[in-house]
Amino acid sequence: MITLQDVSKYYGDFKVLSACNAVIAKGEVVVVCGPSGSGKSTLIKTINALEPIQEGSITIDGVKVNDRSTNLPRLRSRVGMVFQHFELFPHLTIIQNLTLAQIKVLGRKKDEAHQHGMKYLERVGLKAHAGKYPGQLSGGQQQRVAIARALAMDPICMLFDEPTSALDPEMVNEVLDVMVELAQEGMTMVCVTHEMGFARMVAHRVIFMDQGSIVEDRSKDDFFAGGGDHSARSRQFLSKIL
Ligand code: ADP
Ligand code: MG
């Protein structure tokens, strides 16, 4: 589904990603973790070309992301992205947030987009809030809206960048629950998160990054077993967060 081949990226002279390789199969749930500044957000943003890369190649569902001829808006419409800070449109109601891109990007009729949007709002337990504005909802509710908005586009995969790290602790689980459900339904997911409970429950693989490199890419069980063949950096990291 998603392939990264020798992906390197620079900000000026600074090499932020260094020859990253990863293959994510359809239906696979991959958790990406690592210290702050290790390049996790940058890596995930390169997948739908929110950040360009200088070397290597990325393909999603057979489409080359970093190719001039690729229709990026169309590709991005098929890749759901959920950020740390929800990024809902504050001046639109919840349901308008869910229908806008369906209408503008996918060309759906207003009624159809509305129906589809309501279906996903119901899924995340927020149907009753359709007419409210983002500012009237809690952080956890807003993040669930952001997930519903991404799902309403019928994405082929979902990318999450620390979706719970800006939330008050009591709201983390309501968002993780939605993500767990998605994972169990077989959605292909790449999740940057330090929620190791989530990783243990649904991840197939865990990728550990350090200083722009993928230093570990292991099955969940192997990753958490943390044997002597694991990098010192990842063992140290694990010992701090577990
Ligand atoms: P993480 O998500 O793992 O915390 P990031 O991908 O956000 O890491 O950042 C990786 C490195 O790239 C950091 O050193 C950060 O300061 C740097 N960086 C991120 N965005 C930019 C940018 N737009 N310009 C220059 N440097 C950046
Ligand atoms: Mg980040």
Image (cartoon, grey):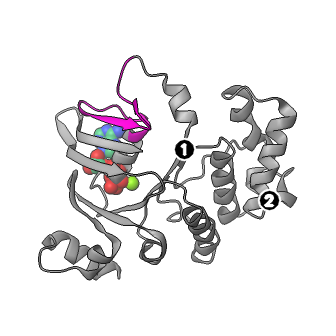
The quarter of the picture where the C terminus appears is: bottom left
- Residue 132 lies, in percent from the top left, at 84, 52
Q: Amino acid at mark 2?
A: Glu
For the residue pair 199 and 36, the one nearer the viewer reads as 199
Left or right of residue 91, residue 224 in this image: left
Q: Which mark is residue 19?
A: none
- Residue 190 lies, in percent from the top left, at 44, 55
Which range is magenta? 47-68
Q: Which residue is mark 2?
A: 122
- Residue 48 lies, in percent from the top left, at 44, 37
For the residue pair 229 and 172, the one nearer the viewer reads as 229
Residue found farthest to the top? 69
Quick one: SS at disc 1? Answer: loop
For the residue pair 61 and 242, the one nearer the viewer reads as 61
Left or right of residue 173, residue 109 in this image: right
Left or right of residue 113, residue 227 in this image: left
Looking at the image, residue 65 lies above or below residue 46: above
Q: Residue at x 44, y 38 (%)?
A: 61
**Do we see residue 93 in this rendering?**
no
Q: Which residue is mark 1?
A: 156
